[in-house]
Amino acid sequence: MEMYNPPHPGETLLEMYILPLELTITATAKALDVSRRTLSELINGHRAVSVEMAERLSLAFGGEAIVWLNQQVLYDLWVQKNKKKKLKVQNLMKKVS
């Protein structure tokens, strides 16, 4: 089931973990063993959650890495769906009929 305008995982990270736990970006980045810039880019939606980052987030905050990856995929698919009309792809299956 497709979500309408799903949040970027960085937004979820900020709203559900960093702010409620009263963490700073610097302290969170240090705990994740990533640079402050890397974490800031993620939170601001300028960086995607990689497999490695998903594992870091699951180790730091609990849960499974797949949850972070699924959220990223849902976000990416929604963004791409809004760009789909710009793609000039031919449907090859129409030619098979």
Image (cartoon, rainbow, N blue to C red):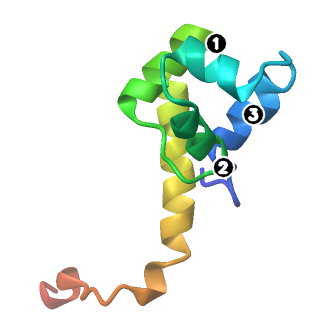
Visible residue check, residue 1: yes
- Residue 88: percent from left, percent from top: 31, 90
Report the disc number at residue 82. none
Residue hosting label 2: 44
Question: Pointer 1: what residue?
Answer: 61
Residue 42 position within the rendered picture, expressed as x and y whole percent measured from the top left: 57, 42
Q: Residues within 10 Å of mark 2 (few under 14, many from 20)?
A: few
On screen, 83 above or below 67?
Answer: below
Report crowding for label 1: few under 14, some 14 to 19, many 20 or more residues within 10 A (C-alpha). few
From this view, report whether residue 59 is shown above or below residue 82.
Answer: above
| Closer-to-camera residue (25/66) | 25
Q: Residue at x 66, y 54 (%)?
A: 3
Q: Quadrant of residue 37?
A: top right
Does the CB distance between marks 1 and 2 fall below 8 Å? no
Quadrant into which the C terminus falls: bottom left
- In the displayed structure, does residue 40 sit left or right of residue 94? right
User: Can residue 64 be seen here?
Assistant: no
Q: CA distance from mark 3 to mark 2?
A: 9 Å
Which of the two discs, 1 and 2, sits closer to the camera?
A: 2
Q: Is residue 15 left or right of residue 46?
A: right
Q: Position of residue 33 (x, y in %)?
A: 48, 16
Identify residue for label 3.
14
Q: Disc 2 on helix, strand or loop?
A: loop
80 or 94: nearer the eye?
80
Is residue 38 or residue 92 the one in the foreground?
38
